[in-house]
Image: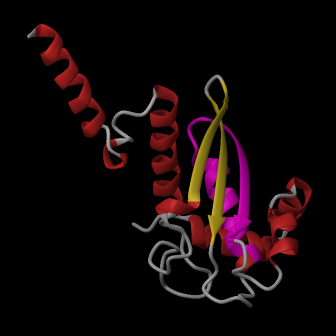
Amino acid sequence: MALALALLWQALGRVWRSPASSARHAPPSRAMEHDRAIEVYDIIRTIRDPEKPNTLEELEVVTENCVEVQEIGEDEYLVIIRFTPTVPHCSLATLIGLCLRIKLQRCLPFRHKLEIYISEGTHSTEEDINKQINDKERVAAAMENPNLREIVEQCVTEPD
């Protein structure tokens, strides 16, 4: 009887660990990565679009699925963002990438390496833009421009 009960519990345990509940039963590092990804998304979703009175979340430029976090060391994470411009020829895609980078650099409470990309196939010059927004020297040079810095500040500042 005890053996039958043990086998039943083992079988039920497999059923209960369906993909829908995998986040609850994930190994500790996967669960932590998931929590970090949600934390990252909460930071970037409120960034304002440079042209429109909407957030990047409202325009679906960023979604929860566009954030990936991987543990690369003890308490250090690789954060990968893949955002989708509203149109394939969006002239402000580089500026949006810059806003994402600046806000995350300022707000992430954990050690991280940051990679930001345009979602594959969603922009006509995605390769060039990906290079620009992941080049520390270009980002630093862009933030030295007072007009550009002011636009970034307006986009990343939390509304009251």
Answer left or right for 9 relative to 70.
Answer: left
* Residue displayed at 21% across by 32% down: 12
x then y, percent, for residue 142 = 84, 67
Please tell me in which quadrant of the rendered image residue 2 appears. Answer: top left
x then y, percent, for residue 7 = 21, 20
Q: In the rendered structure, does residue 25 fall within the stretch colored magenta?
A: no
On the rendered image, what quadrant is the N terminus found in? top left
Q: In the rendered structure, does residue 96 fall within the stretch colored magenta?
A: yes
Which color scheme did the rendering employ for the protein? secondary structure
x then y, percent, for residue 51 = 60, 87
Answer left or right for 51 relative to 91.
Answer: left
As drawn, 104 above or below 25: below
* Residue displayed at 59% across by 72% down: 154
> Magenta region: which residues?
94-119
x then y, percent, for residue 114 = 71, 49
Answer left or right for 46 relative to 102.
Answer: left
As drawn, 70 above or below 43: above
As drawn, 36 above or below 159: above
* Residue displayed at 57% across by 79% down: 49
Q: Nearer the viewer, residue 143 or 51?
A: 51
On the rendered image, what quadrant is the C terminus found in? bottom left
Q: Nearer the viewer, residue 20 or 156?
A: 20
Please tell me in which quadrant of the rendered image residue 61 appears. Answer: bottom right
* Residue displayed at 50% across by 56% down: 41
Which residue ends up furthest to the left in the rendered image? 1
Q: Nearer the viewer, residue 38 or 121?
A: 121
